[in-house]
Amino acid sequence: MGEAAAPQRLVSSYLLLAPMLGVIIAFLIVPLIMVGIVSLYRPTGTGYVLELNLSSYVRFFTDPNIYGILLSTLANSAIVTVMAFILAYPVAYFLTMKIRTFRAKTILLIAMLIPFWIDFTTRALSWIPWLGIQGILNQVLTGLGILREPSPIFLFSPFAMLLVMIQGYTLFMIAPIFIVMSKIDPTLYEAAKALGASPLKTFYHINLKLTMPGIGVGTVFVFLSSVADFATPRLIGGLVTSIGQVIRDQVVFLNLPLASAISVILTLIALAIVMTVFKLMNIRQVFE
Amino acid sequence: MSYSVEAENLIKRFGKTVAVNNVSFKIRKGEFFCIIGPSGCGKTTTLRLVAGLIKPDSGKIYMNGVDYTNIPTHKRPLSMVFQTWALFPHMTVYENVEFGLRMRNVSEADRKEAVKWALGLVKMEEFANRKPRELSGGQQQRVAIARALVVRPEILLLDEPLGNLDFKLQLRLQEELKQIHRVTGVTFLYVTHDQRQAMALGDTIMVMNMGIIEQMGSPIELYSSPSSVFVARFVGESNILEGSVKAVEGGTAIVETHLGDFQLQDKNVRAGDRVWVFWRPEDTYIGRDAMDADYRFNGEVLDITTAGSVTNYKVSVGGQLLKATVKGLPMDGVESGSKITLGCKKSGLKLITKASSSGLADVERIILGE
């Protein structure tokens, strides 16, 4: 009886996972494999023929209009990630170390969530009155005499795109850093001080080092969201082309093998970044 | 005389409560100084004031004669061991112990030697590459002690360091701490709620209650001459009879209690004073031994427990609980419910004239932490 029960329990626990597993297999694993296969087909200009070759990958690595855009997308995403980190860390630090009561922390976290009650595109578009040629930013800058006349560079520009992304993604950096930082035993700071560590060294050796896993998770969240962001560059980035845009264009041009090949490369890069970051940031610590 | 620590009139308030109320003490170089008291008595706050982790509202702290009152923790000549050990979880045992040396910019060769010495002191050399989570509680505490001692502090502060360990381990680490104190010659400031640890370790014990010092002295002084009912009850076991002074005749006070009158030597009481007659359980005589005692009581045995070498009797005398500790195994034919005669001698009695220095009479409640 006891011996038979164990495998039975195992089977039933897998059964519990089955619906979710089914969804993941049907809508993630299978499409990914299909994308992988299609990327190896030979494009014909109006479609593709079922003939395995690497021409789409060759095209990717030889066409600067494609790999160049991937590089600039990665660079922009890196800027967004670094800025989000710079903005998020003080907020998480403040929430953890300076706000004492659980109630106050909750209120502040909810306050930070309020902008996210609005749809992503609406939020992006609501920057227009701020950044436009007659926008508030231009009025303030001309009013103060910093600019002689209103500048068009604030809207439909790389600046606008980065700003909107940073605003949209910083919260995904704050949350994991805050959670990991909250778990640090405050006695550790006192122990460091009592061992002769100045406030700055205590911050570096204890606070920052122990928060690394949170920074890692936040970095992955923000970086991948930025790389994959298709709408923001289109809505507010002006002439900026994102790699997502390139993939979409190839789909429109019916060059599915090339679109698939770019997707595969992008997925591999994302995977490599996630694994590197998790390794560097000692992500295991979170699970121990 | 050079003092490692001199605290002068320290006051610390948290909101409306005065956690430390005008506390002054001096710790000699190399002394093992214990602060004991029930929870909330201000002992940990006092320790944190010395550490500089909190600032006093008023008062001064000197170390080696230098005023450190306004100098931050990391510049004070001390290190600290915490109840939760507070090892850095992302560092190995070696890196933990090395930390204080790195903060002091000690060269790598010197660091290596010092870490080896410190880990040897606590017998943890072979665990140098482990992470704290891979160690038992006792091992973690050993590392914490090594980490604090490796920087050769002038004063080592210990906040309930054995509080999270089981009793047997407590006793063993207690022995080792005493040994380490002897070997290193560092001044120890040790905070605990456990009077047994303080009695076993301390050169000087400071008993705190309600933010003030109840009594300060050697373990022997505290044990043999407690200055208040609070100290008498907090340090060791005791028999205490409440009474009042009936008369004073030539330095001898006659004290009336509900177990009869007692005569005690005391020059400072006056007729009508509320006082307590006090003696230790080992000064209680029982059965045939009680025959030549100065005072005798007839009672009924409530409970007998024996540790082999000594036996403890709890006896009810007219509703008053008296305790006796007698060498050897229980007497033949005596069990719970037996009628028995107890006695005590004049020489074992002490007169206590106050319930508590903090003026709070509800001693039992404070000691039990209720």
Image (cartoon, coloured by chain):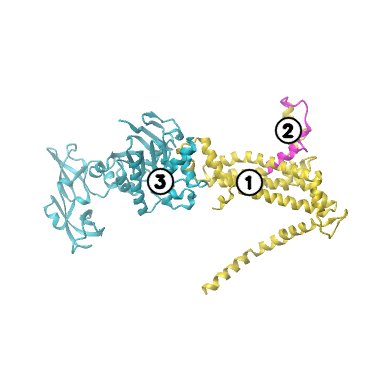
Quarter location, residue B356? top left
Can you tell which of label 2 and label 3 is closer to the viewer? Answer: 3
Q: Which residue is mark 3?
A: B120
Colour cyan, chain: B
Q: Position of residue A153 (x, y in %)?
A: 77, 34
Badge 3 sits on which subunit? B
Q: Is residue B247 above or below residue A284?
A: above
Left-right relation of A133 to A1: right
Residue B9 shows up from this direction: yes
What hue represents chain A? Answer: yellow
Distance from disc 2 to disc 3, alpha carbons, whole Å, reads: 68 Å
Disc 2 marks which amino acid?
Answer: Ile
Q: Circle 2 — which element?
A: helix
Q: Is residue A278 above or below residue B114?
A: below
Residue A113 shows up from this direction: no
Which range is magenta? Answer: A143-168
- Using the image as rendered, state which of residue B184 and residue A20 is in the foreground: B184
Left-right relation of B223 to A1: left
Q: Which residue is mark 1?
A: A218
Disc 3 marks which amino acid?
Answer: Gly
Q: Residues within 10 Å of mark 1 (few under 14, many from 20)?
A: many
Distance from disc 3 to disc 1, alpha carbons, whole Å, reads: 42 Å
Q: Circle 3 — which element?
A: helix
Residue at the spot 72% in from the left edge and 26% down from the top edge:
A146
Q: Which residue is mark 2?
A: A136
The quarter of the rendered structure image containing the N terminus of chain B is top left
Distance from disc 2 to disc 1, alpha carbons, whole Å, reads: 31 Å
Q: Residues within 10 Å of mark 3 (few under 14, many from 20)?
A: few
Residue at the spot 88% in from the left edge and 53% down from the top edge:
A45
Left-right relation of B367 to B281: right
